[in-house]
Amino acid sequence: MTNTFNQIRANDLVIVLKPVMKQVGTGKDASVVWTGEVTVKLLTDLTKMSLNEHDFDSLNRISNLMASAIPAMHENKIVRHIIEYYLEHNSLDLEHMDIVEYEEELTENNVIKLNFDSETEGNA
């Protein structure tokens, strides 16, 4: 069963991964494909935040560490293998939710763009 996420609730910090898409081909043969790049955004609704400053800073730090794992895996094969090993050997209860509606007010300086479609496969 798929859960639906339609708002950022109190004290939520949400990591959004958005694939960068491009059009390939022309006319009838045109299609839109993922470039291998992602945009990473961290969302929260500060008007609903009830955590004290210390707790919010700690939760925000964890969110930033999680988001930072993406470029770390891209740049460092060892980090990627460690995280892949952990994923394969630990039972994680991850909820996948369909995003129905959310409003975001972000600045572009919070965006990380990565390209996973490289010839070096992370071994640059």
Image (spheres, rainbow, N blue to C red):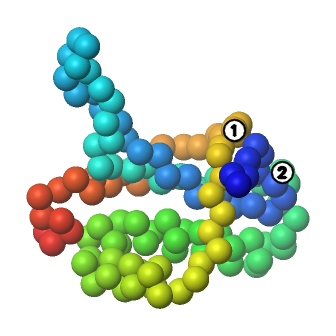
Q: Quadrant of residue 80?
A: bottom left
User: Regarding mark 1 in the picture, which secondary structure is present there?
Assistant: loop
For the residue carrying disc 2, how many other residues have a C-alpha within 10 Å: few (<14), some (14-19), or many (20+)?
Answer: few
User: Regarding mark 2 in the picture, which secondary structure is present there?
Assistant: helix
Q: Relative to residue 46, is residue 18 drawn left or right? A: left
Of tags 1 and 2, which is closer to the observer? 1
Q: Position of residue 59 (x, y in %)?
A: 69, 73
Residue at the (59%, 78%) spot, across then down = 92
Q: Is residue 63 above or below residue 10?
A: below
Q: Position of residue 39 (x, y in %)?
A: 43, 49
Pick whichever, 13 or 47, lies toward us. Answer: 13
Q: Is residue 110 above or below residue 58?
A: above
Query: Mark 2 highlights which residue?
Result: 47
Q: Do residues under tags 1 and 2 come within 8 Å of each other at their CB atoms? A: no
Pick whichever, 109 or 5, lies toward us. Answer: 5
Distance CA(mark 1)–CA(mark 2): 21 Å
Q: Quadrant of the C terminus?
A: bottom left
Q: Relative to residue 43, is residue 73 drawn left or right? A: left
Q: How many marks?
A: 2
Q: Is residue 57 above or below residue 13?
A: below
Query: Mark 1 highlights which residue?
Result: 100
Residue at the (71%, 37%) spot, across then down = 101
Q: As shown in the figure, which amino acid type bears the numbered disc 2?
A: Thr
